[in-house]
Image (tube, rainbow, N blue to C red):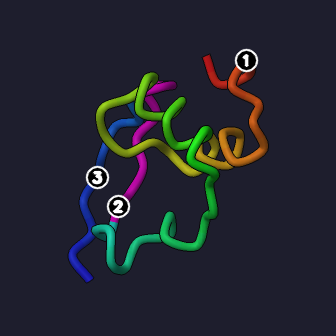
Amino acid sequence: MDMKVKTCGICGKEFTCGSPLSCWCSGISLTKGQLAKLRELSSDCVCPDCLAKASRSQFDLVR
């Protein structure tokens, strides 16, 4: 797996990404509304903490 270091577009924290097919984020389920809100907040990947908060609809805690 080709791991990349990315910076979260929401909180600015660095994290590793293994591409859409083999990354940790593929195990997180989001509703269409949650995904749409994430796309408003960031144009790229987000860190595990922000994605977990988004999956619980806690967007007020993300920003």
- The residue nearer to you, when weighing 36 against 38, is 36
Q: Which residue is mark 1?
A: 60
19 w.r.t. 49: above or below: below
- Label 3 and label 1: CA atoms lie apart by 26 Å
Left or right of 5 on screen, residue 40: right
Instruction: Based on the picture, tell me whether residue 36 belongs to the magenta stretch.
Output: no
Q: In front of the other: label 3 or label 1? A: 1
Q: Residue, x 49% and y 70% (percent of image)?
A: 26
Q: Which residue is mark 2?
A: 17
Q: Which residue is mark 3?
A: 5
Residue type, label 3: Val
Dot 1: within a 10 Å radius of its alpha carbon, few (fewer than 14), some, or many (20 or more) residues? few
Residue 1, x across and y down, in percent: 26, 83
- Element type where label 2 sits in the image: strand
7 w.r.t. 52: above or below: above
Residue 7, x across and y down, in percent: 34, 37
The quarter of the displayed image where residue 63 is located: top right
Nearer-N-terminus badge (1/2): 2
Q: In front of the other: label 3 or label 2? A: 2
Residue type, label 2: Cys
Q: Mark 3 and 2 residues: CB-CB less than 8 Å, in contact?
A: yes
Instruction: Based on the picture, tell me whether residue 14 belongs to the magenta stretch.
Output: yes
- Element type where label 3 sits in the image: strand
Q: Which residues are magenta?
A: 10-17
51 w.r.t. 11: above or below: below
Residue 16, x across and y down, in percent: 38, 58
Residue 54, x across and y down, in percent: 66, 40
